[in-house]
Image (spheres, coloured by chain):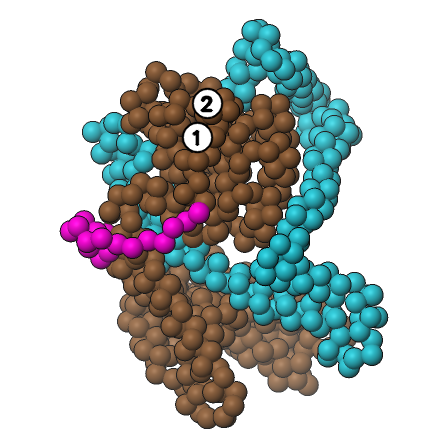
Chain colours: A cyan, B brown
Amino acid sequence: MKREIPLIITFIAGTVFVVAYFVPHSPFNRAESLFNDWFAILAAFAIWLGALNLLKICALKVSRRSKDWYLGFVIIVGFFVTVAVGAYDGVVGLSNVPATAFRDPGTNFDWIYRNVYTPLSATMFAMLAFFVASASYRAFRARNFQATLLLLAGFLVMLGRVPVGDLITGFLPPAYQMSQWATWIMDFPQTAGQRAIMIGIALGIISTSLRVILGIERSRLEGE
Amino acid sequence: MLTNQDHSFSKSHPCHIIVIILSFVFSGFGASAQAEDTATVATYSSDISPAVDLPPITLLAVDTDNDNGGSITISWDDAGYSELPQFRGYEILRRSIQANAPVLVGTAPHGSSSLVDKSVSDDTTYVYYVAATVGEERFVSDSSSHVQSTWQIYNTTLTPLLIALIIVGGSVIFFIETAKRGRKLFLRKIAGLEAVNEAVGRATEMGRPILFVAGIADIDDVQTIAGLTILGRLGRTIAEYDTKITMPTRTSLVMTAGRETLREAYMAAGRPDAYSDDMVFYVSDEQFGFAAAVDGILVRDKPAACFYLGTFHAESLIMAETGNLIGAIQIAGTAQPAQLPFFVAACDYTLIGEELFAASAYLSEEPRQLGSLKGQDVGKAVAMMLILAGVLIMTLASMWELDTMNQLQQLMRDLFSLN
């Protein structure tokens, strides 16, 4: 039964979602909405599960003085300081007239958000620029015919996206200048390739969904 | 052509007539009794002035199509009131046929010509009025026809999609049954999946862990499900090789599902004692917080093999390039077309789109699962034929201005437009 019950639940939930997409009324839309609500409730409770798991792993690392234990210590301190500051701002905000929330501009929590969280996130995102440069260097090496085509297409698109591209090809009629080449590459070969991938993805999703709904794909239950 | 362009039904071809008949049948034969209301502006409001120098606003109120009821769509042609200098907007008024006075159900700004009223009851018949507010005066339309909202059994705009689903789903089931009867099915080799054992073997030989990232989406994303089904197959190999796996997750539900999947894989491999919950752990719901944690693991633990299988966004290259820098063998797969070039550039093998969804079936080598992949191929063949037909029709329609070609072209557009 431990194997059958998950399969039955998957079949019912999957079928309801498929039917509700085509049949816009009760009972399917209600069932769909109900399942979505259950998912939201589960996800909300699971946040605690995740947070407690993170703290447990970090606490074990610190107590055992495992490798890089100090990183776990930073996470624990960061977690509790942020929660404490948010809770303090929330309680103090209740006595303000009008009442303020812990996330409002000007609170201590907001200070942490603007001066710690945002710069750290921006730093990670900014690293992308350097990684794009190193990855492009490897991708655009003309090792074979396909890589050379990629290099050529990339070169034309990049040049066509900046004013100097049209300047170089200024002697040609406007319809044949570099920006038009770039537009043509993006509108036709690129779009065609992307749509081919999208069609494959759509078919793959249908096939995978059918395998899961019909219980053919059951790798998650194979230990039983 | 298979485009996402929005084209309304042409009233000239037979498909439209069929849809109209079906819509009528499905709407329960009682969608809207179209009797003209005899109420005039003067009977329900004394402060509404009649239009003097412009014709009245004409309006149409109909039951909203393909919905769950409780909705009426009102559209109007304002006859030039919106061009007046002091025009302020439209007011949409509704009166049930049992009531005397109308109520305001919504306002609409300059330039709008329709409004969906979702505050109606299916068992009541209404009439509508649209008032153009100009300065302090309101110019009110005649009443609309009687209208009543109803629900429809089936969303007729999705018929082409339903047909496609039946063809592909039917093919998948047919080939699953064919495979079950023992017929040998040919499958092309997928390099990325052939390299899975090599990657696990390499990690074992080097005594380093394997990193598995199931994307950054939650468990309700089909790419995450695909990633986890691959984890199930991969987990068994890892358990057999007695290698260590590390799986940081971005959401708690994926952590729970990942643990369950790995536990089952270790049990299936006969190594339940080697499994530990600590292999799969939650890190952060924040996209770049998660990316930073994965990068930290890559740099500190130096895994010998990295798997990125699921939904990825901007963090894809941050992770994959770091993995490349530490010299790990990397296998990635996603159905996010915008991230595929990054994975192709930074990883050794990339599962492109559908290959991600085929991976679990491919690795399982079970006839029933392999049969489902052949079913997908039928869908691809149908798509290819339709694309070729579309290209041919569009080309011929552009070369010769024949009515038949234009009608065929419109039919193709209608078939592949969901709106």
Mark toward the start of the polypeptide (2 vs 1): 1
- Residue in the picture at 63% in, 60% down: A148
* Magenta-highlighted residues: B174-191
Q: Residues within 10 Å of mark 1 (few under 14, many from 20)?
A: some
In this rendering, position of residue B229 left or right of residue B3:
left
Query: Farthest residue in the front direction?
Result: A143
Estimate the x, y position of residue A208 in percent, counting from the top left. Answer: 35, 48
- Name the chain letter of the residue that bears numbered label 1: B
Which picture quadrant has residue A174? bottom right
Q: Is residue B176 magenta?
A: yes
Could you say which is closer to the camera, residue A111 or residue B225? B225
For the residues tagged 2 and 1, is the chain the same? yes
Mark 2 residue element:
loop
Is B308 placed above or below B55 here?
Answer: above
Mark carried by residue B256: none
Which picture quadrant has residue B234? top left
Give the labeled residue for mark 1.
B201
Is B192 placed above or below A46 here?
Answer: below
- Name the chain letter of the residue that bears numbered label 2: B
- Residue in the picture at 56% in, 6% down: A64
Estimate the x, y position of residue B196 in percent, counting from the top left. Answer: 43, 38
- Residue in the picture at 45% in, 66% down: B418
Give the labeled residue for mark 2.
B244
In this rendering, position of residue B24 left or right of residue A86:
left
Q: Tell me the kind of residue under disc 1.
A: Gly
Estimate the x, y position of residue B171 in percent, counting from the top left. Answer: 27, 59
Could you say which is closer to the camera, residue B231 or residue A99? B231
Whether residue B387 can be seen here: yes
Q: Is residue B249 magenta?
A: no
Q: Tell me the kind of residue under disc 2.
A: Lys
Is A93 placed above or below B7 here?
Answer: above
Mark 1 residue element:
helix
